[in-house]
Image (cartoon, rainbow, N blue to C red):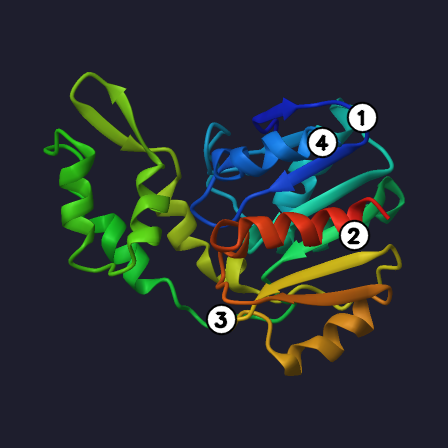
Amino acid sequence: MKIHYRELGEGKPLVILHGLFGYSDNWQTHAKKLADYYRVILVDLRNHGHSDWSDENSYELMAADVFELCRDLQLHNFILLGHSMGGKVAMHFAQEHENLLEKLVIVDIGMKEYPMHHEHILAGIHSVDLPNIKARSEAEAQMSAHIDSEGVKQFLLKNLYWKEKGMLAWRMNVDVLEKTMPNILAAVPSKVVTIPTLFIRGELSNYILDEDIPAIEDAFIDSEVVTIADAGHWVHAEAPAEFLETLLAFCLR
């Protein structure tokens, strides 16, 4: 599948993959700063953002989409960064196309299978009465019955757009993402990757636990795990300065 992307800056390519229910715009602020050093390529994965929708959704397919984009753009010796779901896409890509990469950065996701934990988010999304609301504020009020976090609500609201005058719609393919959630939560194969890899986790997040690190180090044999204090799962948004400093310290060395 041909997926949507945007570019900023020039130089060595740095490809960024967003997480579940996100899209490239989530990384726009960081991309503007990283564009001083790199040719930053912000990707919309299938069923997200401005990319096409498909009834099929898996890490193998998403990694293949990224490979097709890299082939079209003739990318090689580049840095690949992925957050959450995008991090698992990046791990799959590295396992299949390590020869194309210089470095790999995985943000707050491990290799393991995760239990279902998106029920409240899906309930909030489904609570939005799209045919009848006339403003984003109405959508926010409806989601508030299921989602307490202001950050999560604002993150989801970025997916709403005016499909036509007076009609809001989701950029993400909610039905397929919900149907294929077992694929999204699935573990990454334990295939060895030798390129330098950085795992960044938030201190307040439970996505990468201390007991998960040995399995990560067994598969990504040249890896390190850095913990950013006072940050949760959206570590790049919650501690942007510390995140950017950690990222550049790894990428530029």
**Sequence-earlier tag: 3 or 4:** 4
Specify few, some or many for label 3: CA neighbours under 10 Å numbering under 14, 14-19, or 20 or more. Answer: some
Helix, strand or loop under label 2? helix
- Residue type for callout 1: Gly
Disc 4: which residue: 68
Is residue 90 visible from the viewing direction of this image? no
| Earlier-in-chain disc, 1 versus 2 | 1
Labels 1 & 2 near each other (Cβ < 8 A): no
Between 242 and 110, the one lying in front of the other is 242
Single out the mark in the foreground, 1 or 4. Answer: 1
Q: Which residue is mark 2?
A: 250
Q: Give whichever of discs 2 and 3 has the lower sequence position.
A: 3
Q: Are marks 2 and 3 in contact (CB under 8 Å)?
A: no
Q: Position of residue 11 (x, y in %)?
A: 80, 26
**Which residue does the numbered mark 3 point to in the structure image?**
204
Q: From mark 3 to mark 4, how far is it between C-alphas? A: 36 Å
Label 1 to label 3, Cα distance in Å?
Answer: 34 Å
